[in-house]
Amino acid sequence: MLTDTGLPGPVSAEGLRQRVGEFLAGHDPAAMPRLEFLRARFDGGLAAVHYPPGLGGLGLPRALQGVVDAEFAAAGAPTNSPERIGIGLGMAAPTILAFGSDEQKARWLRPLWTGEEVWCQLFSEPGAGSDLAGLATRAVRDGGDGASQSPAGQDGASQSPAGQDGTGQATAARGGAEQAGAARGGADRWVVNGQKVWTSMAHEARWGLLVARTDPDVPKHAGLTYFACDMTDPGVEVRPLRQLTGEAEFNEVFLTGAVIPDRDRIGAVGEGWRVAQGTLMNERVSIGGTAVPREGGMIGPAAATWREHAELRTPGLHDRMLRLWADAEVARLASERLRQQLAAGHPGPEGSAAKLVFARLNQEITSFEVELAGAGGLRYEDWTMRRPGSVSFYGRDAGYRYLRARGNSIEGGTSEILRNIIAERVLGLPTEPRADTRVPWKDLPR
Amino acid sequence: MSAPTQHTSAQDKAAGDAAVENNQAPSTPSGGLPDLLYSEAESELRSAVRSLLRERCGWPEVLARTETSEPYDTALWQALAADLGCAGLLIPESHGGAGASYREAAVVAEEAGRAVAPVPYLGSAVVATAAALAAGDTGLLTGLAAGTVTAALTVPFASKPSGGGLPATVRVAAPRPGDPAGQARLTGTVTGVADALPASVLLVPADGVPAGLYAVDASESGVTRTPVVSLDATRQLCDLALDGVPARPVVSGPDAERATAAALTAGAAMLAAEQLGLADRCLEMTVSYLKERYQFARPVGSFQALKHRLADLWVAISQARAAARYAAACLATDDADAPVAVALAKAACGDAAALAAQECVQLHGGIGFTWEHPAHLYLKRAKSTSIAFGTPDWHRASLAGLARLPGPGAR
């Protein structure tokens, strides 16, 4: 009955529509500033119906969100530009909801959802890709009693910010930064040193989801802690990372004496791995679970080119076209089946499969497209270094798609790691003998 | 239909999500696509069929039967067809059937594939039944539903559901003096027919006047069925010869072509479901073997090279399952997208089944190459079924027209 939602009677699509209608009657989207409207929508529990009451939602099943979005779209209401805040909506919000304190939820969710505060993800490091739990960025607690817990000056070892020895020892240069930070973050705070990489939106983000090593003396999974890192802290430096497409979608983030107040820790000290797993689960679902119409994916441009340019067709390409079309359509059906399983409350393990298939298909289709283009495939649109706000494969030429798709089997869990996950968690096959799980992290070879 | 539900062993849980997934999806899934999950009733039907097949159709018996003169298990077929009512799934209740649909029929086909069951379910309860339904042959349907009649559409198992005319190698012969009015006589041969050996009624596409579908009593003296040594000995083909055999006209002209095409399309879709069940079983056997088999002092399933192969196989099967469900759902509602759906399913499931059976042999190592291990039963069924009713390549090629992807030289 969910009386605390204030919904009239049982929760139904009709009841929700009515609620949206009442909201719109009091909040004319044409007459209000965009941000004010979005804040009011959040406060009205209509931001994301599956968020809890009082935190932008109504505690309803996620499947009902479509009803609300459709009503707002029909009314011409402004959106929160979800493509710009995908990491916030897709990863930060579920993590905060699952692991955050009440105070954190109240503080972060509203500006996250309205887009006032962009979030990014500070997980991968140059030395920790697939082996994320081996990461080396150090967070040291500074309870306010000064140098005793700060790494600064402990041994005076010199280290570049990009250094990957993972000890988190301070450099001489950073000592200054850290002292400057002593006033920041309040009495109970953490000081962070290390390097993160492959960080989308870091240059626009206010907050970063950070996993850092807080105890190097225990096995690697046990010594991690999860934080929200204020990206405006003077110890945070963001540099663009140019990828093989010529663009810089991503960044490197150097953390040099960055200060995080303890109140921005998410989950208990040493629980970082468990929290990060929750975030990554959402990442894979968000990549693999989108429903599209027939030819709505990467196969669309390929099929369109095929139909328009009879002169490019060869028997060999025809066989590939048909196979790719069939595979893409079957993958679309499998995604829809996964979506139905989620809607029925039985999330199947097929999510991992969807990401694997999506990566392979995108790569094969774009490779086909470049060949189909023939001489045109020898050209490239533009190598100029740019920093796109969001990534879209569409409206770009086949060469860009071909190059960008190479990343699909690396980002968000490599295809090789996904196969391990399927083999071990779905099929129950034994793990490989491991040398890295019972040894203190500091003693691991690297 | 009785549906025992005591079926909860751990092994069955491992048998794939199909067996344990209950459909609680909304009745109108978004994206314009039908429900691709298994309903509760479908899962109960699966349990009932699996129990029967586990009890009566273990692989050692299936293997032993292939070297006897009775390649089909008629007693098991009777239990499946009449006792469980699987013969009448597609037949309306008004004719004594269950009034179910291709969704339910597909679940039974999956289970038949899992067990490489030597029963004429596909030939009789799917292909011949689909032909009789399209032809409106109520007498035949009533017998099929009751399990008193087993029928076969006499087309080569390698026929393609192309819909281009009757695949007729049999001719309508001149009637003989004294033949009752309305009775025809048929002469000719058909090679490589599936599920005709145990059939009591043969539905024969025949050319002549009039061209159409004819029903022949298989016990007539002019009917000769010569068993073929078949790649898949669990579904033994036969060559059929008719020598002036009395026949009852069922339907003629374009209606007969439509009935035959509908039967072949249904056959392809349900064969895809059979392949899905077969693939699932091969994966399951292989996974459990790789957990038990030790080499180099560790289970061989812990080696990443093998794990990745099985992960890829599981992915292929997950994809194929969506395609098979979509095809069954489209046939169930006579959806306009059925030709595309069936082509996708037969291509995806055919490839997945062949891959699964081949991996099953390879990853079992030496034991998988022996006669005493069931892997070869699955390998042979997988390869045969991927040739039957259109190969994966043939079905993909059909998409050139269906999806408007013309080849070189076409517009």
Image (cartoon, rainbow, N blue to C red):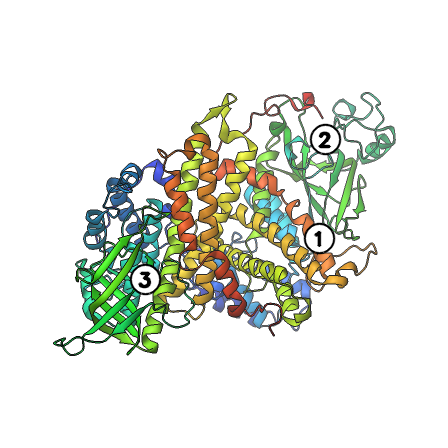
Picture residue at 28% right of the left edge, 69% below the top: B133
Q: Amino acid at mark 1?
A: Arg
Instruction: Give the image location of residue B157, x and y in percent.
Output: 36, 58
Marks 2 and 1, Cα distance to the nearest angstrom? Answer: 32 Å
**Disc 2 to disc 3: CB gap under 8 Å:** no
Say if labels 2 and 3 share a chain.
no
**Disc 2 to disc 1: CB gap under 8 Å:** no
Chain under numbered label 3 = B
Circle number at residue A138: 2
Instruction: Give the image location of residue B208, x and y in percent.
Output: 30, 76
Specify whether residue A340 is in view: no
Picture residue at 59% right of the left edge, 64% below the top: A296
Circle number at residue B190: 3
Instruction: Give the image location of residue B316, x and y in percent.
Output: 50, 48
User: Residue A129's quadrant in the figure?
Assistant: top right
Q: Amino acid at mark 3?
A: Val
Picture residue at 49% right of the left edge, 31% below the top: B301
